[in-house]
Image: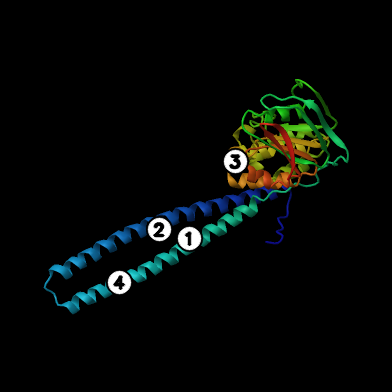
């Protein structure tokens, strides 16, 4: 693709990007509709062709026309059907090509990037569980997390995955055992309760980082795939994927930033582009990461170092 120069200030850049994305989306929707319309036409043409062939067969069976005339009619029908099939295939190929180009343009315009995350991965143990007991899982959990560890938590519903994340986030007391967390963490639950749905993305990121210029924070939100309009509206009006981007921005670009990122089922209710964007964001996070999810393919794409598995015999730590 190469580089594109937009010129102007941030507002001009954001408006141009938004315009390009809207045009690509409109093109995609147009060609998808045209493809469906062409498919309906093809279906109708096939039906008419089948009806003509059926009539021709009946004529050859019933009529008194000379065989040579009937054979010529059959030949013309077959030639016409062949030309029609070729035209239909060419039209379908053109629509598929246009749809692919529009999708690629959208993919380019919605590409996200994390820039200059001010997280210094700790080279020491950042969190420890000693003889922690969790509901519904046998045995005691002993766990030490280091500053660059990337841990996936897997297990059936009710096995205590969310409770484990809340313990790491220090949002609930431990029932038994000892918990020690030595760095600042950010916890995002399944409903993104950390976001104020009545306030905009830029308002909340500004509160999280009062030291950074607003223009810089706006640029970082744009690099996460949020348009100028989306940055300024109440977060409750954004999609689930967009809200997740805002919540992550408030955690990663905060002052100080989180060195331990805790996510509970973050891939729930996301469409494919949003899911791919989330995977890209999390792969670029340099701190310690703990993610609970049922989606094993999603976890696989996060470059994890370990899995913590809830089993009938207790918690088992395995290398990824």
For the residues marked 1 and 4, what is the alpha-carbon distance in whole angstroms?
A: 26 Å
Disc 3 to disc 2, C-alpha distance:
31 Å
Q: Where, by quadrant of the figure, is residue 169 drawn?
A: top right
Q: Which residue does the numbered mark 4 point to in the structure image?
A: 78
Sequence-wise, which precedes: disc 3 or disc 1?
1
User: Do the CB atoms of the residues marked 2 and 4 lie less than 8 Å apart?
Assistant: no
- Mark 3 near mark 2, Cβ–Cβ under 8 Å? no
Tag 1 near tag 2, CB within 8 Å: yes
Quadrant containing the C terminus is: top right
- Residue of label 2: 38
Q: Is residue 20 left or right of residue 79?
A: right
From the viewer's perspective, is the residue at label 2 or at label 4 nearer? Answer: 4
Residue bearing the label numbered 3: 270
Question: Left or right: 23 with respect to 2?
Answer: left
The image position of residue 65, as x and y in percent, is: 13, 74
Task: Work out whether residue 31 or residue 11 is closer to the camera in this orientation and state it.
Answer: 31
Question: How far separated are the C-alphas under marks 4 and 3?
Answer: 49 Å
Residue 294 vs residue 59, the one in the foreground: 294
- Determine which of the numbered discs, if any, sits on residue 95 in the image: 1
The answer to which of 115 and 17 lies nearer the viewer is 115
Q: Is residue 230 visible?
A: yes
Marked residue nearer the N-terminal end (3 or 2): 2
Above or below residue 184? Residue 76 is below
Work out whether mark 2 precedes mark 4 in sequence or the reverse, and give the earlier one: 2
């Amino acid at each position: 693709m190469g580089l594109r120069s937009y010129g102007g200030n941030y507002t001009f850049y954001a408006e141009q990007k938004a315009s390009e994305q809207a045009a690509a989306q409109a093109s995609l929707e147009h060609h998808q509709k045209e493809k469906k319309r062409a498919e309906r036409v093809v279906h109708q043409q096939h039906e008419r062709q089948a009806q003509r062939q059926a009539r021709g067969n009946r004529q050859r069976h019933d009529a008194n026309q000379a065989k040579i005339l009937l054979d010529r009619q059959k030949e013309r029908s077959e030639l016409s059907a062949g030309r029609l099939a070729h035209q239909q295939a060419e039209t379908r190929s053109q629509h598929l090509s246009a749809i692919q180009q529009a999708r690629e343009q959208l993919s380019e315009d919605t590409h996200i990037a994390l820039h200059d995350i001010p997280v210094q991965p700790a080279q020491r143990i950042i969190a420890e569980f000693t003889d922690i007991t969790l509901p519904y899982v046998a045995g005691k959990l002993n766990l030490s997390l280091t500053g660059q560890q990337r841990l996936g938590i897997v297990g059936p519903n009710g096995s205590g995955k969310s409770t484990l994340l809340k313990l790491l986030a220090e949002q609930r007391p431990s029932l038994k055992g000892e918990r020690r967390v030595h760095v600042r963490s950010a916890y995002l639950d399944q409903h993104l309760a950390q976001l104020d749905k009545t306030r905009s993305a830029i308002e909340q990121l500004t509160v999280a980082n009062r030291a950074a210029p607003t223009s810089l924070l706006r640029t970082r939100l744009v690099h996460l795939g949020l348009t100028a309009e989306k940055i300024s509206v109440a977060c409750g009006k954004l999609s689930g994927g967009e809200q997740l981007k805002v919540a992550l921005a408030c955690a990663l670009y905060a002052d100080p930033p989180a060195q331990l990122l805790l996510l509970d089922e973050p891939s729930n209710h996301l469409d494919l582009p949003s899911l791919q964007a989330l995977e890209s964001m999390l792969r670029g996070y340099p701190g310690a990461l703990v993610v609970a999810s049922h989606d094993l393919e999603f976890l696989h794409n996060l470059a994890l170092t370990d899995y913590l598995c809830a089993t009938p015999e207790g918690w088992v730590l395995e290398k990824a």
